[in-house]
Image (cartoon, rainbow, N blue to C red):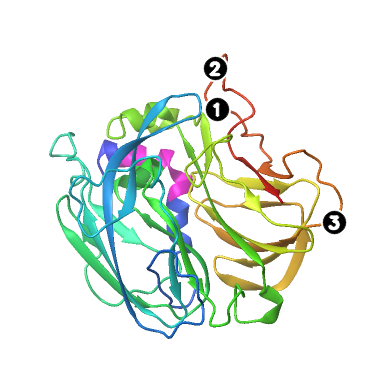
């Protein structure tokens, strides 16, 4: 193993742990975007993804280079930006036969030829069993992965390339397989909901993102924490009224364990890693390991929320800041949003 690989493996230990979760769940599938009807007939589904580079802007105006998956039939000039990072969830119906075509449009690796291959994308979905075929796409190449969406739930798709550096740069996203019954997260009535929200959690160290090929990952220090690629106050709120059941689909695309807390209400934890729990339970805070997914339903109470903005949903480790002091956008910020009418 080269020195490059040793650094990546040691310093991104939490990201590497994600791969051990990958084969725990029965075969299922992914693709599509905003499919709204879960009762549609099962059908072949094809999705084109481009692994590309680009940049996003933080609330304090800091511009950060990122990589990400963009849904497009052509990678030409399709760069990652504030509107498509990390991208809308891929959504399919239970039973669909799905093919995802992943084209690698990442920039060439400037490192010496003795290092690992140039930014090869290694596309995977923990919990998915793919049909036999290629798994990797070198820069400029395309790989196609096919599978059947046999189990409803919330999954993460990602690239495991460059010893975890690709995922740290933003090559991750959410996959939703809808139940055959509309407005149910799974094939049981107890998972019914009125409103749903997908929450992809992640973090950014701008110093790493500026030099992903050469940065010493032992010095990785995140200063921005994101929900769906945004830091508060740019995060989108969740609109729901008293009595409505809100399905929260958590996806931890970050490098460490992340605890999310609901203030003023509880959530019922139904599933982890797209598998229903034998004993669902109520909680006001839940910790998601790196690479994990979780489904929970929170019923909006009739009592007044603790904030004029609504019921806060935020990072319990208090990663609710942007940048470093004395930045004027230092707080409040980070991994924070609200459930509100």
Quadrant of the rendered image containing residue 147: bottom left
Residue at the far top in the pictured view: 326
Instruction: Give the CA separation, mark 2 to mark 1.
Output: 8 Å
Q: Are marks 2 and 1 in contact (CB under 8 Å)?
A: yes
Binning the other alpha carbons within 10 Å of mark 2 as few (below 14), some (14 to 19) or many (20 upward) gives few
Identify which residue is drawn at 46% across, 82% down. Answer: 40
> Measured along the vertical axis of the image, is residue 233 above or below residue 238?
above
- Which label's residue is closer to the chain start, 2 or 1? 1
Along the horizontal axis of the image, is 3 left or right of 179? left
The location of residue 90, given as percent across then percent down, is 42, 63
* Relative to 113, 267 lies left or right: right
Q: Is residue 202 left or right of residue 208?
A: right
**Percent position of residue 257, x then y:** 58, 46
Find out whether residue 7 is within the magenta segment. yes
Mark 3: few, some, or many residues within 10 Å (few <14, many ≥20)? few
Question: Magenta segment range?
Answer: 5-15
Tag 2's secondary structure? loop
Looking at the image, residue 114 lies above or below residue 125: above
* Residue found at x 42% / y 77%: 149
**Label 2: which residue?**
327
**Percent position of residue 84, x then y:** 38, 47
Q: Earlier in the sequence, mark 2 or mark 3?
A: 3
Residue at 22 percent of width and 45 percent of height: 106
User: Where is 267 relative to 319, above or below?
Assistant: below
Number of other residues with Cα within 10 Å of mark 1, as a class: few under 14, some 14 to 19, many 20 or more: many
In the picture of the structure, the residue carrying the numbered disc 3 is 302
Q: Which mark is residue 322?
A: 1
Quarter of the image for residue 97 reads: bottom left
């Amino acid at each position: 193993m080269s020195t490059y690989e040793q650094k990546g493996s040691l310093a991104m230990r939490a990201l590497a742990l994600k791969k051990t979760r990958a084969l725990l769940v029965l075969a299922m599938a992914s693709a599509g975007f905003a499919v709204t009807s879960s009762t549609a007939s099962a059908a072949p589904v094809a999705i084109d993804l481009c692994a590309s580079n680009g940049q996003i802007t933080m609330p304090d105006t800091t511009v950060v280079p990122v990589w990400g998956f963009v849904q497009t039939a052509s990678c030409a000039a399709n760069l990652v930006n504030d509107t498509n990072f990390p991208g809308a969830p891929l959504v399919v119906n239970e039973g669909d036969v799905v093919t995802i075509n992943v084209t690698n449009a990442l920039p060439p690796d400037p490192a010496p030829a003795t290092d690992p291959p140039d930014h090869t994308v290694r596309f995977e979905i923990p919990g998915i069993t793919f049909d036999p075929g290629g798994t990797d796409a070198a820069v400029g190449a395309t790989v196609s992965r096919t599978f059947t969406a046999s189990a409803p739930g919330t999954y993460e798709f990602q690239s495991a390339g460059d010893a975890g550096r690709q995922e740290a740069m933003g090559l991750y996203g959410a996959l939703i397989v809808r139940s055959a019954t509309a407005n149910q997260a799974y094939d049981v009535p107890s998972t019914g909901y009125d409103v749903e929200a997908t929450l992809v959690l992640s973090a950014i160290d701008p110093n790493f993102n500026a030099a992903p090929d050469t940065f010493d990952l032992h010095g990785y220090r995140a200063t921005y924490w994101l929900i769906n690629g945004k830091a508060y106050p740019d995060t989108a709120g969740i609109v729901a009224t008293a009595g409505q059941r809100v399905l929260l689909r958590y996806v931890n695309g970050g490098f460490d364990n992340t605890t999310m807390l609901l203030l003023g209400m509880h959530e019922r934890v139904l599933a982890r890693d797209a598998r229903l729990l034998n004993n669902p339970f109520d909680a006001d805070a839940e910790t998601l390991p790196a690479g994990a997914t979780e489904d929970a339903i929170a019923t909006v109470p009739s009592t007044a929320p603790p904030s004029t903005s609504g019921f806060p949903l935020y990072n319990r480790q208090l990663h609710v800041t942007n940048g470093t002091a004395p930045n004027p956008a230092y707080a409040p910020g980070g991994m924070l949003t609200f459930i509100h009418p």
